[in-house]
Amino acid sequence: MNNKRRTIGLLGTISIGIGGMIGAGIFSIIGIGCQIGGNAVYVSFIIAGIVALLSSYSYAKLGVKYPSAGGAVEYLIRGFGDNIISGGFNILLWVGYIFALSLYARAFGSYAMTFFPTISHYWLNIFATIIIIIFIIVNFIGAKAVGSSEFFIVIIKISVLIFFSIIGFFSLKSDFLSISQWPSMNNIFFSAAILFLAYEGFGLIANAAEDMKEPEKTLPKALYMSVAIVIAIYVSVSLTITGNLPISKIIIARDYALAEAAKPFLGLIGFKIMAIAALFSTSSAINATLYGGTNVSYLMAKEGELPAFFQRKVWGRGVEGLFITAGLVILIANLFDLSKIAMLGSAFFLLIYGAVNIAHLRLYKKTKANSFIICLSIAGCFSIFAILIYFLLKNSPLTLIAFIVVLMASFLIEGYIAVSYTHLTLPTKA
């Protein structure tokens, strides 16, 4: 590849990773994490972060060996072959994007509601739907995100969260953070399994490997540094929240916990600032993820892993994938509450990252990787995945049923497409 096209340096690559992770996760699921993990939620963030850090090893090695904008789509095909297994997981990846988008839309609606405290709760669904429709229009028109602006967007997000953490540190109440008030270790691990969703965006770094300067050096450094920085930010923010609000109040305001936690030390102005920051972050995350999810669906359709109408063209552009993706996002955002969307989204991504690590284990000699680290990563992903499934079985069996249905549907759809494709390409007899 022509080196002149390699324009992204280490700082730009780190900003992609941090932007992908802090896009909206911390604003949308911190309250759910606190409800389950209590004042030990920062421990849950550390556990989930370690699992993400281990998985970033596979993405670093695979990204250098197989640089591709397809990211996980490419790695799964390389590891398992172009078959029902890789195809099913790739459909599940697309579904994961849909649930992440639904989470961001629902979170946007929750924070928007704080500016209109007297209106009906149904407006939450309306706000969530409106923001998706806005970005359908934006993506349909073809507005392009300016790559150079991503660094400044990330700086704004990080600055707000660091300011929140530093100012809030001086008003922490030691009683609220007492270890004696920790929930059971089971709850801490349950919370970690759900909070993994807040780290899922690190994989976006590997998607940019083709455009990096010296990717063999830049990609690993960017992956490890971005995950480590995000862990530090999440731990600081969670300590500030649980150190300034009793868990009972966090649970009441769980859908907009970050804004509510600013009240004790920044007052109503702080509440509004954090709410506006959340609207900004969820909006930018929706725009970027909708664009990425649409591209993934188009690429998968082109490779024969989704029905062909996903890559048909309207008015000269392939937009069927955009409309179908956005339509499903609106449906899920209106059918499920924030906690169920977070649980399902985290379950999907844990399964996908576990599969990517297994794919890497089949390729570790080619990538010159350490098989022990890969095995640790596989164990990490599937351990907290199993914990999450157990939690759903005990506390939300209907959500578990929804997960199983979507999982089975992903592989059944891929199987049907594979059979149809084989039938269409078989040579006809004379």
Image: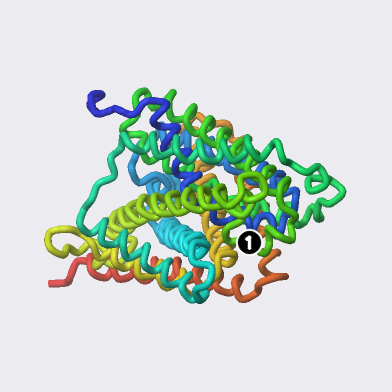
Question: Viewed as shown, does residue 125 lie left or right of 422?
Answer: right
- Which quadrant, please, contains the C terminus? bottom left
Crowd tier of the residue under label 1, counting other residues whose Cα lies within 10 Å: few below 14, some 14–19, many 20 or above: some
Which residue is more in the foreground, 38 or 218? Answer: 38
Residue 117, position as x, y percentages in the image = 53, 68
Which residue is more in the foreground, 264 or 320? Answer: 264
The amino acid type found where label 1 is placed reads Ala
Toward which corner of the image does residue 132 lie, by quadrant? bottom left
The number of discs equals 1
Residue 108, position as x, y percentages in the image = 46, 60
Residue 322, position as x, y percentages in the image = 29, 62
Res 24 seen here: yes
Which residue is more in the foreground, 149 or 47? Answer: 149
Q: Which residue sits at x=61%, y=35%?
A: 232
Q: Which residue sits at x=51%, y=43%?
A: 362
Give above or below for 117 relative to 160. Answer: below
Q: Residue furthest right?
A: 180
Q: Which residue sits at x=48%, y=76%?
A: 122
Question: Viewed as shown, does residue 401 lie left or right of 41?
Answer: left
Q: Which residue sits at x=55%, y=63%?
A: 344
Q: Residue furthest front?
A: 268
Residue 178, position as x, y percentages in the image = 83, 45
Q: Which residue is mark 1?
A: 253
Secondary structure category for the residue under label 1 = loop
Toward which corner of the image does residue 35 lie, by quadrant? bottom right
Res 418 seen here: no
- Which quadrant, please, contains the N terminus? top left
Q: Coloured how?
A: rainbow
